[in-house]
Image: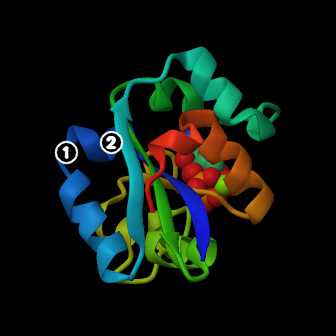
Amino acid sequence: TERTLSIIKPDATGRNLTGKINAKFEDAGLRIVAQKRLQLTKAQAGEFYKVHAERPFFDELTTFMASGPVVAQVLEGEGAIAKNREVMGATNPADAESGTIRAEFAESVGENSVHGSDAPDTAKEEIAFFFSELEIVG
Ligand code: GTP
Ligand code: MG
């Protein structure tokens, strides 16, 4: 079984949607095996999203990610990385399939409610950014 890093972003925590989003994960067969709520500094958000450092939206992205609480979580299950991205829907909510988290809850391409790792190597790195092995209980 596979693990992926998920983040419920500040737009979603601000609208009190943590439980509804977690229900989507659990309904899809993903297990929440670690979870914590925290507020990132802008520098920490920049470190987390460093692959996007040269993108024009980097400043907007890191300002937003530091603007309120996030819920970082490890999701576990068969094909968890792909399954989570399926449940999240397309980056831009206007393109997201109905029933997905972003179709239902996201406000814009920037404020799109959730993050999910995109590959096994990034999942490993992103999980280690937030959690020690002791904090992950499958
Ligand atoms: P993540 O799971 O958050 O990584 O989303 P993704 O993999 O679907 O998208 P990608 O990695 O390409 O972009 C990372 C994040 O940058 C997105 O989730 C958005 O929050 C943000 N982002 C992407 N494109 C834009 C944009 O055009 N404008 C703004 N403001 N943010 C963007
Ligand atoms: Mg991405």
Judging depth in this view, the residue of 123 and 41 nearest the camera is 123
Mark 1 crowd level (few <14, some 14–19, many ≥20, 10 Å Cα):
few
Judging depth in this view, the residue of 102 and 70 nearest the camera is 70
Residue 67 image position (x, y, % from top left): 39, 24
Element class at badge 1: loop
Residue 55 lies left or right of residue 85; in this view the side is right
Determine whether 56 is above or below 88 in the image. Answer: above
Q: Quadrant of residue 61?
A: top right
Element class at badge 2: helix
The residue under label 1 is which amino acid type? Arg
**Residue at position x 50%, y 68% in the image:** 76
Residue 116 lies left or right of residue 68; in this view the side is right
For the residues labelled 2 and 1, the Cα–Cα distance comes to 6 Å
Determine whether 82 is above or below 106 in the image. Answer: below
Q: How many marks?
A: 2
Q: How is the image coloured?
A: rainbow
**Residue at position x 55%, y 18% in the image:** 42
Judging depth in this view, the residue of 81 and 17 nearest the camera is 81
Residue 81 image position (x, y, % from top left): 61, 70
Determine whether 137 is above or below 86 in the image. Answer: above
Is residue 122 visible in the rendered image? The answer is yes
Residue 61 lies left or right of residue 10; in this view the side is right
Residue 1 image position (x, y, % from top left): 60, 77
Q: Are the residues at dot 2 and dot 1 in contact (C-beta closer than 8 Å)?
A: yes
Residue that label 1 marks = 15
**Residue at position x 60%, y 21% in the image:** 44
**Residue at position x 29%, y 70% in the image:** 104
The residue under label 2 is which amino acid type? Asp
Residue that label 2 marks = 11
Is residue 113 visible in the rendered image? The answer is no
Judging depth in this view, the residue of 94 and 6 nearest the camera is 6
Determine whether 27 is above or below 46 in the image. Answer: below
